[in-house]
Image (cartoon, helix red, strand yellow):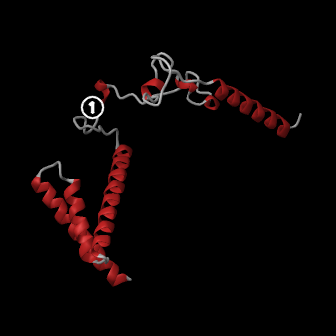
Amino acid sequence: MSDSSTNASASSSNAADTTAYLRNASFSRNEGPSSVDAPVTASDLLNTNAFDPSRLHPMAAIGDKLDYLLLEDDKTSTLPGAGTPLPSRGWSDDLCYGTGTTYLAALIYNGINSSIDAWRGKHDQWGSMAAGGITGALFKSTAGVKPMFAAATLMTGLAGGWSWLKTVLL
């Protein structure tokens, strides 16, 4: 038997298994028939009696090999920044958190900048600087007034510098 016919028969058996699984799958409520007034909730779907991670996707063939990220309390106490809500396991965690924070700050800045431009009807450096100041203030708003003012000042300066640099280079 050739490799292509073996692959085709394995593929068709996987598809048949998946189709049979999906046809036989059902969700039920403990308290009786569902009505429009009582829609199915997440707790109905994730009933602790019937929840089996290997059933999440039958083609995954997870079985009992599903692995969870476990941060044990005694091991996280030795990590740098262990007293913070997000303990760092090293530079890769710091890079991921920093990248996410940067993307979020950029998203907020661009949203505010676009809103200011739409409200004013023009795009200029003053709108960019205002968006930078508001973004900086929002970013440090939970740290207090002084850090909020410092971040707003820094972001206003960075936005103004970037706007000036764009006019010089472009």
* Residue sitting at the far left: 146
For the N terminus, the quadrant is top right
Q: Which residue was labeled with disc 1?
A: 78
For the C terminus, the quadrant is bottom left
Is residue 30 toward the left or the right of residue 151 in the image? Answer: right
Please state the horizontal and vertical placement of residue 92, each as a whole percent of the image: 39, 45
Among the 4 quarters of the image, the one containing residue 119: bottom left
Among the 4 quarters of the image, the one containing residue 85: top left
The residue type indicated by label 1 comes to Thr
Please state the horizontal and vertical placement of residue 160, each as a whole percent of the image: 24, 74
Is residue 108 toward the left or the right of residue 157 in the image? Answer: right
* In the image, residue 65 above or below residue 155: above
For numbered disc 1, what is the local secondary structure? loop
Of residue 29 and residue 120, the one placed in the foreground of this image is 29
Please state the horizontal and vertical placement of residue 98, each as a whole percent of the image: 33, 51
What's the residue at 45%, 18% (across, down)?
A: 48
> How many numbered marks have been drawn onto this rendered protein structure?
1
Please tell me how crowded label 1 is: few (under 14), some (14-19), or many (20+) other residues with Cα within 10 Å: few
Please state the horizontal and vertical placement of residue 146, each as a whole percent of the image: 10, 56
Is residue 39 toward the left or the right of residue 165 in the image? Answer: right
Is residue 37 toward the left or the right of residue 121 in the image? Answer: right
* In the image, residue 26 above or below residue 99: above
What's the residue at 48%, 27% (across, down)?
A: 35
Among the 4 quarters of the image, the one containing residue 139: bottom left
What's the residue at 13%, 60% (across, down)?
A: 149
Of residue 41 and residue 109, the one placed in the foreground of this image is 41
